[in-house]
Amino acid sequence: MIIVMKPHAAKESVNNICSFLKGRGFDTHLSTGEERTIIGVIGDKSKLADVGFEQMEGVDKITHITESYKLVNKAFHPEPTIIKFDNGVEIGGNKIVVMAGPCAVENQEMITKAAKSVHEAGAEFLRGGAYKPRTSPYSFQGLEEDGLKLMYNAKKEAGMLMVTEVIDKESLEAALNYTDILQIGARNMQNFKLLRAVGKTNKPVLLKRGLSATIDEWLNAAEYIMAEGNENVMLCERGIRTYETTTRNTLDLSAIPVLKNRTHLPVIVDPSHGTGKNIYVPSMAKAAVAAGADGLIIEVHPTPEKAMSDGDQSLNLNEFSDLMVQLKGIAQIIGRSL
Amino acid sequence: MIIVMKPHAAKESVNNICSFLKGRGFDTHLSTGEERTIIGVIGDKSKLADVGFEQMEGVDKITHITESYKLVNKAFHPEPTIIKFDNGVEIGGNKIVVMAGPCAVENQEMITKAAKSVHEAGAEFLRGGAYKPRTSPYSFQGLEEDGLKLMYNAKKEAGMLMVTEVIDKESLEAALNYTDILQIGARNMQNFKLLRAVGKTNKPVLLKRGLSATIDEWLNAAEYIMAEGNENVMLCERGIRTYETTTRNTLDLSAIPVLKNRTHLPVIVDPSHGTGKNIYVPSMAKAAVAAGADGLIIEVHPTPEKAMSDGDQSLNLNEFSDLMVQLKGIAQIIGRSL
Amino acid sequence: MIIVMKPHAAKESVNNICSFLKGRGFDTHLSTGEERTIIGVIGDKSKLADVGFEQMEGVDKITHITESYKLVNKAFHPEPTIIKFDNGVEIGGNKIVVMAGPCAVENQEMITKAAKSVHEAGAEFLRGGAYKPRTSPYSFQGLEEDGLKLMYNAKKEAGMLMVTEVIDKESLEAALNYTDILQIGARNMQNFKLLRAVGKTNKPVLLKRGLSATIDEWLNAAEYIMAEGNENVMLCERGIRTYETTTRNTLDLSAIPVLKNRTHLPVIVDPSHGTGKNIYVPSMAKAAVAAGADGLIIEVHPTPEKAMSDGDQSLNLNEFSDLMVQLKGIAQIIGRSL
Amino acid sequence: MIIVMKPHAAKESVNNICSFLKGRGFDTHLSTGEERTIIGVIGDKSKLADVGFEQMEGVDKITHITESYKLVNKAFHPEPTIIKFDNGVEIGGNKIVVMAGPCAVENQEMITKAAKSVHEAGAEFLRGGAYKPRTSPYSFQGLEEDGLKLMYNAKKEAGMLMVTEVIDKESLEAALNYTDILQIGARNMQNFKLLRAVGKTNKPVLLKRGLSATIDEWLNAAEYIMAEGNENVMLCERGIRTYETTTRNTLDLSAIPVLKNRTHLPVIVDPSHGTGKNIYVPSMAKAAVAAGADGLIIEVHPTPEKAMSDGDQSLNLNEFSDLMVQLKGIAQIIGRSL
């Protein structure tokens, strides 16, 4: 249930309602806009059926949400969420951000070279995997904390930010010392324990869509994070599982307008995992920007043919630079920048 | 098997090889480019294992195609197919074409109004259904030949071309008198009898992807048409069936670069059926152009709320005009026009 | 809308209601059970909103069907449909039927041998393809009418019945002279022209589920056949398209109880196309019988390793005989025979 | 790589080979059958290319496994795994086991009543959820350790065993004190941290298939558990995600023969989550037994209409007893008991 206050309602009115609700055992979440405050009420609403909220001081109207997600719901928070970083970079605003880098971190030289190059081409975030969840127990599982350090050195030298995946409590604790964004991978989208753990931190979270998650399940997963108090969540479309085999997954770009219609959270697109083949990445990156994505996360490797993991889905540095030029043009056409 | 001739090989050399092959019971298809001729050999290639084609006059090299489709294969015909119409309009060239109009044709006034408006906004083709394949036998099945006449009058008055669906021998025979492009709908993508019938005409064919067709099956369906002699085939992505229910289908935009990599045929995208909801159409239309589509087919209805069929997936005329402006901008950024 | 008459209501009352409805422009379909008659009303029911049917002579109650299919609906026809053949064989009754034979008909000797053997093991119907819809135009398309003749000779010599696929008007006309059941293949499940054509014949029809058809679409396809007057329709589950690749399709056996809950039509299962591998066929055949299927259609080839089409999904004669013994046992356990 | 020893090869020969391999840095896993010993070699086999294993004392032959899973592979361990419990119950042998009980544990009276009743009808294991992973953070998440205690009391009083889901380190530690089988739920099938943790215990593990996991990914998940030393793993099919909406998931019964062909691990089927509707459960339970499943896990609730979670997919006690009678009959027909 959502209580929409009148424009410029007194702070006292808001406080009164919140106190009343807490007294009845409900949680409340405030969304304070420039004009209005919206109070989200969390708990069994049937116990409030007899309360005449609409007669209370400052209340404009009551809205009932039928979806199971509340905090991520656009009805509760109509303004888009903008995530702000210390160096002034923002995600979810007018400017589209690009995250780029190799699939797995391999050594300092490689990752620093990659970082400098993608930053020069316009990427604000270095991406890379230190902890890799792999289908087989015998596959390369990443350099772990050493990988985080290599990425950290690289981003510092390049003067940029970083995003990296966490897969459990240990990797989360380690990553908090190095990364600017915590990534939850597709296989962990419904690892509710992990969602709650990142929800208790104050780091922005990039939540990838599960391998065959519905949009509704995905928004509920984001709700797990927000319900713990972390409001800086982004949703990352990375392809869904279908019967088609020419691409590794089927990148569901229609998820972009669907999400923009349902949630205030920023939407990022991963055309690299979404297609699994580098020759298809530029088309899908351009399409994602044209469709309204707030950001892209792209695999770029200084020497894709030598990559230890997922090499054939990485762009090389030249391909990435060329792509960035076209992306900037498309962003401008739809009234944004990049 | 494909025989690639040397640049500027003598016509006589080509003829000799074709005669030799016909004598052995093989069909041949020539693709004559500016520099080179390519000879496609159709039949059981194991019977040619002992023939030393590479020693024959004018032959550059032999290529073996492992895919089951030959004539639609880019290996056989590296240059993109450009379909030319009498009024100078082309599909598959640098200029992106737009086909627009209502789902079903309802009456003369409506269809003429729609035609003029969409043409004014830049659409070159009027789209509309006179024969509607419907899931239930009790649903509106279209105005049939009367509908074709209404569309014909409308396109003539607006000075444009038209595309409409055929579903069987009777509708095909009727449509040949009115339409500029024959559309094969998703449910008929593997109606091989119908594919062969349109393959025997000289009208361009728009072949929609089946509801859950693989790209390989889709290209083989196009091969059925081309094998009958009709070279003017375009492929239309219209969404595939997945588990996701927020959109009617999942528009597979990655099919665009995949097809561009495998075939020389033009690729059209239908964001209206692909999403099933008008609010998602503009994003997907822009994404399709950014991803490299050669054309779009969009449902536009003068008064969507009154449409007899599929109303909630149609744009109104203002929404369509606004969209066309942005599409032109994106086309320019990627080096094309619209 | 369905008008349920009182038990043993007078025939005159039924006639009066039908006359009244025809006068208002509605079609009616009668389902006459031992106790009651049920009148199905086809047309725009909003025009009947003001009619007090419940006050009419002999009427018990009115039921509104929300599904788009009526004639195939169990609400309209609660008793199971039993399809009867001249030699006394029935489909849809207590006895489970088995249809067996090769994928494609190749020559007289092979098909006669196959027929005799499968009949001896207990199969009542010979299956085989004379007209083969194939993904590629260059694949073997069947022996056509010659194939029908070979099958006809074989079934006569073996003293059994036959089922074969029709793909268009020509094959339908030819098949009517030879076959006992007309099969509509998965790719033609929504070839509405063909559905109507078989609906106009008096031959029983086996309607395969489309490659990724929903159960609702499938029942609507059956409705197209029944709406033309042919009441002898069976539904054949043959696997649906999913992301799993260890089997050619995913055999959806839960479709059996779902169909039994929604329709009165017999349900047949095809474990051969459903799995695409002969080693998985016996398990799935047994499962289908245990789940309540009214029949099975199984590929059996005298020499599977030499088959011209789909050889690796055929059982050999010994495997088939062994399977039949177990199927009989399972049928008995669930209170049926085979 | 797998080293197959000669029948009755000396134990010393086996030890020699293992020592040699350990000296080179490889892990080995022994599978000791009645006649032969098989040595699985884990590590980068390219480093062994020059070793002439076939000349070593006692070696019969070398087999190379191309699948990424080794320990779960039937090639490595041809005999079926039989999991033995203290009370003499076995899973994976001739006798088929049934696990039954409510979705969530609610109170002592209910769970004890359910336990006694299902045990009387023939179930050997009580199933029930104390820790429930739920899509929404606001849904009932289970009674946690209190729920485990209630189940423990109930199983003791009924004289049976129990199976319950663990979702993280805490629930695993708690469950080890109460449960006989640890269940890993579908959403955690690729929670590799959790797989490793249960792999380090000596409790049998029931590994549910992920919501849209391929069979290959599922076997690799089982490999994670076995690679830690826990050999008592069973695989539980519980339906996969498809486009069909009449059932909650599509129960993939063809997974049973596919798994029987690839792995030695027991296969359990969950028809309750697989269909999501109690009216479809009996058909699918019978089908699973007919198809060769080693066990079933079925939701049974004393009063399904009052259940706190998933009520409409639970059988009541009478329905369950009736089903067990038919399951016993089918088991007998295929040469097993239940």
Image (cartoon, coloured by chain):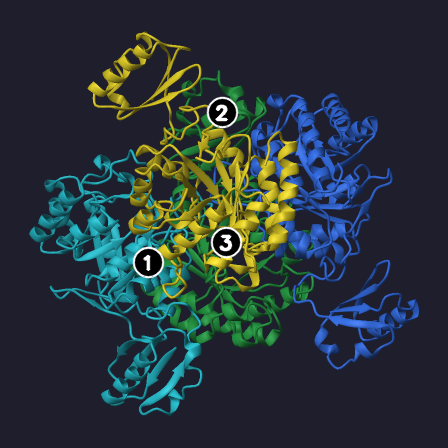
Chain colours: A yellow, B blue, C green, D cyan
Q: Dot 3: what SS?
A: helix
Which residue is label 2 attached to? Answer: C17
Q: Are marks 3 and 1 on the same chain?
A: no
As displayed, is residue C39 above or below residue C157?
above
Residue drawn 84% across and 64% down? B37
For marks 3 and 1, give the one nearer the viewer: 3
Answer left or right for D202 relative to B32.
left
Task: Give me the C-alpha separation between circle 2 and circle 3.
Answer: 85 Å
Circles 2 and 3 on the same subunit: no
Residue at label 3? Answer: A112
Q: Is residue B201 left or right of residue C275?
A: right
Inter-mark Cα distance, 1 to 2: 48 Å
Instruction: Look at the numbered disc 1 and give the secondary structure of its residue.
Output: helix
Q: Are marks 3 and 1 in contact (CB under 8 Å)?
A: no
Q: Report crowding for label 2: few under 14, some 14 to 19, many 20 or more residues within 10 A (C-alpha).
A: some
Question: What's the residue type where badge 3 is placed?
Answer: Thr
Q: Nearer the viewer, residue D270 or D106?
A: D106
